[in-house]
Amino acid sequence: MERVATYVVAATTAFFALAAAWELFGPLPGGHFGNAAGTAMGGENMLKWRFFAAVLEETVRRPTPAQYNVHHPYGMYLTQALSHALVGHGWVAVRLPGVVLSALTPPLVYLTARALWGALPGAVATLAFALTPIDLAFASFSSLEVHTIFFGLIFSWATLRLWSTWRTRYVWLAALGALGACQSDWIGMVLVGATLLFAFARAYVLPEAWFGRIDHRQHARWFAWATAAVVGTLVLYLSVFAAAHQLADLLDSYGVRTEGNDKGFADVFGQRRIMWLLFMLPAPALCAIAFGVPAWIARAATGLIGEAVPLAWFAAACVQYFVFRGGADVHIFWPHYFGPVFALTCGALARVALALPVDMRWGERASKLLGRGPVRLLEVGLPLAPFAFVFVLVGRVGLVQLRQAHLTGGRFDDGGRYIGIEQDRNQFAEWATSGTPLRVPIGFHPSFERTLSAEYAAHRPVFEVPRGPPPEDGPRRILVDARQCSAGELRALARSGAVDAVGPFWRLAIDRPATGPRALAYREREPSGVTRYAVTGTDLVRSIGPEEDPWASWEWGHHLGFSEPPPALPPRTAEEARVAHNVARLAGDHDAAEALAARALVGFDTSMHADFTKGVHLLGVRIERGPAIVVSLLWRTDDDLVPDEEDFVVRSRVLAPPPLWASAIDYFEKDVAPPMALRPALWRPGHLYAQRFVVMRRVGVESFEGEWSSPDGDPRRPVAGGDRVSLFTLR
């Protein structure tokens, strides 16, 4: 049975490691996953400046104490420093600590549960951990929680082995785990402290006969080193932060994290909080925890000392989730510490199931027919059969939420707001700054949000430039997101310097003359093969240049008022045929324009045609189903077009959950499409325009509708009536 358990644990560990390493080599997304770039910059600065401080921004001069981040211990910054020392600056370095620690965590779950209840319960606990949505979804996230869980399990396992053997090596392993957990997160101190509190009561308060003999010398050594890890870590950081004059900032962060503690539980657990909790810990997991915790308390009260260890994990998880409520309001991964709690709960329940009395008479008869081995497997498998059903339900949610986490950067619903596919922004920022000397400052236009992942991609200090004319004393290179600019801003920016356009993004060089935007070839394709695993399995694979895209250059120049001659080459793709149609219309060649419009419409579902006021028509919708679901809308303008600063907004609603879904579904109406880069206020009469975007598909049956939105409150409306048009449904 131990051999079978070993095989199960090995297979589970391999699966979890592969899940953690998914998209290891791809650009960072936005959201929580993208914010890991801040941790990466903190570790890289430690390495670069040879100091013990976390500075979450790129610097060319030695940072001052005012720049130090003092909200957390520095354990995860130290692992990032090690990662960057090994592989250098890049996307791999950001994810590597989380991937490595996550890959090594399932064996630690097994060792901890085996030390408590035996090999088979240990295998059950390992499976539970590896299938839980919150563990899967954030396995590649180099977060406080991933670090603390890894080192906390080392501490828990070594402590259990020490209590049963009193061997010296477990004293040192427990001390190492305690120090790592405390250095990773303040909650690590709660975990170690809760274990120490029970150990103190056991050794020095309660009768020895209750819990059995203690090797007082070894126990005292363990207790002293674990206590030193907690107290020493606390004193270390209070001293470092006080020396940097940042204790007030630390206290302010505590106030933010605990905001809402005065509210009752009925006020805290609203619809969104319950949805988030069920996303990460489905109903079977919550039920298991509800059964397991009272059992641990009862067993610990009867003298089973090991049951105090899972209780310490439960205490740490509760402090994180219920004391730091402000963090739980904005971070869906806040209950991550309940992942090990659920795993250990399943191990404890499996031990109870295996201890149930079984009538062995049928086994004697079956052994003569089948052999003792298969019968023994049945005798063990039947009590554990209910766990298979639980794991099917939990794993069904976990595998889906693993994809949703990568798709949304760990944000999931984000309150119905539009979540951008920020891999394209980060890839563009990396491309736009590569080869540029560090002495050349880079500016981020307000349209190009200064996120931690974009700054890490630029790998240099960046400056936020104001809207309006670029300042004379500002950066000579400015990155712009055309989708977030008005038509007037785009015209002004195009005349303030040379523009390299890459899809919806611009690199503006204000020290070069403005001759009209030059669009570089921007290719997007669905991932396949090894790329689908190693780079991205949820987004498109993109490549930039180096050659120019003459059709895109002409379109940008034409709409921004530059006299660009049209390309002399015939169009090769449907997108080029669309632009060529506009060229033909301007030339008055209506027959050629109609033929080119037919080419541009290939693959579109024209049954979704819709007419709108102010001279705009939706000709059709095309859905490309692959690892990334790409939606294209094709628009045509009339000769009586009224240009306006509007956007066509696509929104979706989840109508029903998928089969066997033991969790919640997203109840928000969600924006799913970014604004168009070629702003509708720039559109010309008689032209064709394409709106293309990657859909962040949600779980279940999802219905999509569209409507025009206008800042003046008078948007285009469907001629057939109403405000919206139905577009499509994804099942």
Image (cartoon, helix red, strand yellow):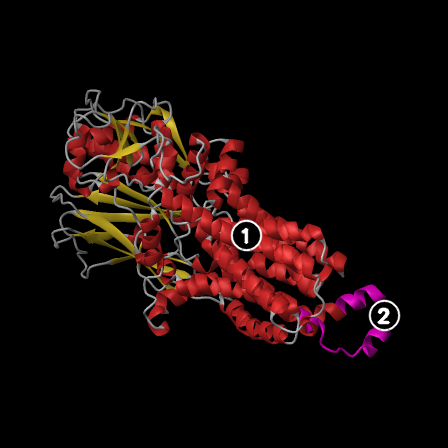
Q: Is residue 246 left or right of residue 236?
A: left
Q: Measured from the top left, where is residue 295 in percent x and y?
A: 59, 74
Provide the secondary structure element on which disc 2 rests: helix
- Closest to the camera, between mark 1 and mark 2, is 1
Disc ID at residue 474? none
Circle 1 packing at 10 Å, graded few (<14), some (14-19), many (20+), is some
**Circle 1 is placed at which residue position?**
228
Q: Is residue 333 left or right of residue 582?
A: right
Q: Measured from the top left, where is residue 241 in percent x and y?
A: 38, 45
Q: Measured from the top left, where is residue 396 in percent x and y?
A: 53, 61
Q: Amino acid at mark 2?
A: Ser
Q: Nearer the viewer, residue 341 or 588?
A: 341
One can see residue 531 in this view? yes
The image quadrant that residue 544 belongs to is: top left
Are the residues tagged 1 and 2 within 8 Å (C-beta)?
Answer: no
Q: Amino acid at mark 1?
A: Ala
Q: Measured from the top left, where is residue 474 in percent x and y?
A: 21, 28
